Image (cartoon, helix red, strand yellow):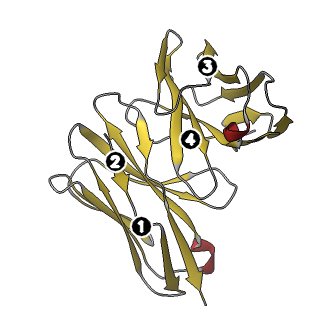
Amino acid sequence: GQNIDQPTEMTATEGAIVQINCTYQTSGFNGLFWYQQHAGEAPTFLSYNVLDGLEEKGRFSSFLSRSKGYSYLLLKELQMKDSASYLCAVRFWANNDMRFGAGTRLTVKP
Amino acid sequence: DADVTQTPRNRITKTGKRIMLECSQTKGHDRMYWYRQDPGLGLQLIYYSFDVKDINKGEISDGYSVSRQAQAKFSLSLESAIPNQTALYFCATSDLGGEAFFGQGTRLTVV
């Protein structure tokens, strides 16, 4: 299969840093995406990794290790509005479609 | 106007009824997708299409069908709706290798 695994829930404090992990089957990997989704709303794109290493975009960074089938999303200087679900999605060569993990629900507390 | 538009936004229908969810896009993308999301869960791929003549089944296609009427239009049908098809449905588009852009979702309730 094309299992994509993320923790179900995480809690962090406003102003802190949080890391959300994602693991996936490495066979046929063709790119990894992170999306943010507020309850009842559409997912919105955060970041994309296809090569190993760190991609930084303001407060958000994403890391990829292709050999380990591992990625993480790093959120710095957490704000209350960052409370949302974070979805890891992988594109595989076999179908070239986009498959999603179940998402990690992040709660930011004051 | 939104780049990806879904209609209707909300729908309540009875078991056994046929229902169509519509999606149109102005992004000019070739690739279009239909996903289903159940409460507290991620997105499951129902069908996807890479161009007008290309339709592919996703993870959970049973009970659903699709039609790609034009590059910009991709509709999802439930031939005979059942209560466990109650969910939030998202249409998305992308170009080759790029990120997906999502519509605002259709909340479907089957009673």
Tell me the number on the disc at residue A3: 2
Considering the image in quadrants, where does the C terminus of chain B appear?
Answer: top right
Task: Tell which residue pokes out farthest to the bottom in this image.
Answer: A110
Q: CA distance from mark 1 to mark 3?
A: 32 Å
Q: Position of residue A89 (x, y in %)?
A: 41, 48
Tell which circle, 4 or 3, labels the residue nearer the N-terminal end.
3
Q: Is residue A58 above or below residue B73?
A: below
Quarter holding the N terminus of chain B?
A: top right
Mark 2–mark 1 distance (CA, rounded to whole Å): 13 Å
Q: Are marks 3 and 2 in contact (CB under 8 Å)?
A: no
Mark 4 vs mark 3, foreground winner is 3
Residue type at the position of mark 2 = Asn
Q: Nearer the viewer, residue B7 or A58?
A: B7
Q: Name the residue beneath numbered marker 4.
A: B101
Q: Residues within 10 Å of mark 1 (few under 14, many from 20)?
A: some
Question: Residue A109 at x, y = what percent?
Answer: 59, 86
- Residue drawn where x is 23% and y is 36% of the image: A28
Between label 4 and label 1, give the one nearer the viewer. 1
Task: For mark 4, give the secondary structure.
Answer: strand
**Residue A101 vs residue B65: left or right?**
left
Residue at the spot of label 1: A7
Local SS, label 3? strand
Q: Residue at x 61, y 19 (%)?
A: B66
Q: CA distance from mark 4 to mark 3?
A: 21 Å
Q: Which residue is mark 3?
A: B65
Marks 3 and 2, Cα distance to the nearest angstrom?
Answer: 25 Å
